[in-house]
Amino acid sequence: MLGENGAGKTTLMNILSGLYHPDGGEILIDGKQVNFTNPQDAIQLGIGMVHQHFRLVNNLTVAENIYLGWSETPRIISPKKLCDAIEPLMAESGFYCDPNKRIEDLSVGEQQRVEIIKALVRGAKILILDEPTSVLTPQEADELFRNLRTMTESGRSVIFISHKLDEVLSVSDRITILRNGQNVITLPRAESDTRILAKHMVGDESFDKKFAHGVEIGDPVLELAGVTAIDDHGLLALNDIDLLIREGELIGVAGVSGNGQRELAEVIAGLRPIKSGQLLINGEDWTGRSAAELAAVGVGHIPEDRNKTGLMPNLPILENAILREYRNPPIRKGPWLRKGPAAEFARRLVQDGDVRTPNISVAVRVLSGGNQQKLITQREIDVATRVLVAMHPTRGLDIAATEAVRSALIRHRDHGVAVLLISEDLDEILSVSDRIVVMYEGSVSGSFTSVEANRDEIGLLMGGSKQDI
Amino acid sequence: MIPNLFNAIFPKWKLQRRSDYSRVRGYIFKLLAVVLALLITALALKLAGKPPLELAKILITTSFTTKFGRTQLLRLATPLILNGVAMLIASRMQLFNLGLEGQLYIGAFAAVAVGLHMSGPPTLVILLMALAAMAAGALYALIPAVMRIKAGVSEILTTLLLNPLAIQFAAYIGMDVWRDRSAVGGSANTTPSIPYNLPTFFEEVNLGLIIAVVIVLVVWLVFTRTPWGYEVTAGGSNIGAAKYSGMPVIRNLFVVMLLSGALSGLSGMTQLVEVTHRFSPRLSNNLGWMGVNVAILAGGDTLAILPWGIFMALILFSGTILKTQGILDEVVLALTGLILLLTSIGEVLANYRLVNMDKLEENAMKEISRVDIEIEKIQ
């Protein structure tokens, strides 16, 4: 099932899983009309739901989570016996996860597997997965796809919800597209391709723009020389990184998440100390400077998580717009923060960034994800007179918002700014980058120009294979 | 919670969340809640055989028409406003300073130490007392601040636990170390009286109140009109975003906590110099806690500290008056609790509207037929 953010996919699936009640219409299972009043009924009828945000208790074990709220759960049982009891059920379902482990110690992919096991042991014949790949690394996603195949081969049905065209194409037998709460079309896979799907999904042909390169690549702007840094757990996250970005150049950083990309962005933005090595901007040493100092010298940073770091969701647009600019005149004058220029600045960002909002005093949390991201993007573009670091800038956005953010990055590159794009979406990187570097275990494992870039080779490097040069 | 409960009781009606937020509506609901709390108290008094209307009349005439009443009221308001704004400053960065009562005592202790043991021009000594009180209050708040910021220990617990320690310390000082050995009776368990007074203006308004009001105005100005105030608001709203922007978050956390302690300490000094003149564990009588209430009632709105502080003073003062009418002043505590409970409910309810389900359906049907007619027209 395919559809943009807000097309109604999740609502429909919540009805199927008994969380919401339909106002009208009927649901048929095996040709018989059924009625659910709660999630228990849906489970009884063989519908299992894996939510995008997992419904697991972090400090309980895998076995405990599977048995939680299940009618089959014995009233009194020792943890040991609970684990023993779950093993054969897992074997039957074809999925495995160590039942003794606590949820908080599992990777996201493993947690998702626990959710799937939970649904399967309860006898799910129809499994609904709501955007299951949005939280997974590419490897984990591939594994999930293989597992989904195994499930359908064993006679179960799977509803796979996504807004990624390629995934839907690669995994589905039939594809249904929702737009504005309506079933637009249902197609067999054989009759569909990316272009057809995208057309139905967004409703027009505004897809697949090519980004021509605008300006000549100029002098070096940002240079990392032998940079080493440690992560939050004290482990080596960046190992002797050398990186050079020039004026008007967009470098894409490919890699499976967790290979040092976040630390790379933080080092450049001044949020993470550099253990050894140098950070140069226009040839000057800026190693060990604070985030505020680097912003002042023209380093903008679109962070990975807009709700946790990029924005203050409960504050109005105005306060969010001036997050970087409040230190500078005209917003700051002497000891004062002036509301007039601040509002003017916020209105300009909203206008330039095409943020759809009734006014600048609404709380940012009521904006859609796309508009939130457009606000951050415009704000950081305004900071980034020299360098712009963008980490997963289009993650979770629908096609229209994705296009808006991407073309904003491109336009900014064409103004002569050095842009570093970190993304898990290889298509995104391939379509916009002038040069592509691959990160693996804290090092740059390969570097390509956009002409010589080769999907397979990049994929191999992301997975840790050595590049033969 | 409340909407669910409501739907369970009245299935025909539904509480629907409003999409817009209106400040005025919030104020109206809060005022209604206060009125309701007063009515409930009046009903309780009536049932207990006391005439509520007459009591209210006595209360209002004593508080507002007599010089004694007005002076008392404004003296009570001083520590309430100071502690209210102290609580509010810390809560701007999501720090909950429940140790105001203790910081007040420690501040008063520092003030009495200066007042008893230093001599010099009164103005200078009073100034030093104020500075010592603020420094001591800040230092006492530093302990939970360090524990929270450096080690992640919840400041709610640590500030709370430091309160009895401060009060017992006050008992030790007042009843033993600096006990007034010349006194007999009630004042035998306190320190000697300090020979200083703060000046009053217009015969009724004490200097402490003026200082408190000025502080509220300054804090409001700082929070709304300065870059630092913005940093505090940002840090309190999302600490991740504040760090990302390069704000000195750790430093700001320390500063707000120390400021909070300093203002509470200052309220200990004004209480000492304006009201008790002696230091003992009866110096405050929950003024710090009432300050927490004031901040909760003001709900993050700095200027609202002023009216709510005076309102709380009125409630506390009414306890004194009720006592003269043979009613236990514990009634006041019950009333305070009732006001807090009802205003909190009112604050939530202000975001909802009441809809009749039948009407809702009727309107939907009307809308559908209207659309149908329009479609027919087009066809």
Image (cartoon, coloured by chain):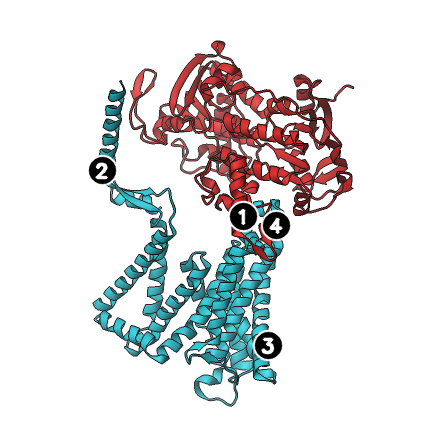
Chain colours: A red, B cyan
Q: Are marks 4 and 2 on the same chain?
A: no
Front residue of B271/A208: it is A208
Q: Chain of mark 2?
A: B
The residue shown at (42%, 63%) is B294
Which residue position holds label 1? A342
Closest to the camera, between mark 1 and mark 2, is 1
Label 1: which secondary element: helix
Closest to the camera, between mark 4 and mark 2, is 4
Label 4: which secondary element: loop
Question: Would you say the residues marked 1 and 4 are in contact, meaning their CB atoms lie under 8 Å apart?
Answer: no
Q: In the image, is residue B344 above or below residue A169?
A: below
Q: Position of residue A356 (x, y in %)?
A: 47, 35
Where's the N terminus of chain A, which quadrant?
Answer: top left
Question: Would you say the residues marked 4 and 2 are in contact, meaning their CB atoms lie under 8 Å apart?
Answer: no
Q: Which mark is residue B128?
A: 3
The residue shown at (78%, 39%) is A283
Horizontal placement of B95 versus A275: left or right? Answer: left
Instruction: For marks 3 and 1, give the CA distance.
Output: 41 Å
Q: Quadrant of residue A146?
A: top right
Q: Are marks 1 and 4 on the same chain?
A: yes
Horizontal placement of B256 versus A56: left or right? Answer: right
Which residue position holds label 4? A329
Give the residue furthest to the top.
A190
Q: Which mark is residue B359?
A: 2
Q: In the image, is residue A353 above or below residue A194?
A: below
Q: Residues within 10 Å of mark 2 (few under 14, many from 20)?
A: few
Q: Residues within 10 Å of mark 1 (few under 14, many from 20)?
A: many
Where's the C terminus of chain A, which quadrant?
Answer: top right
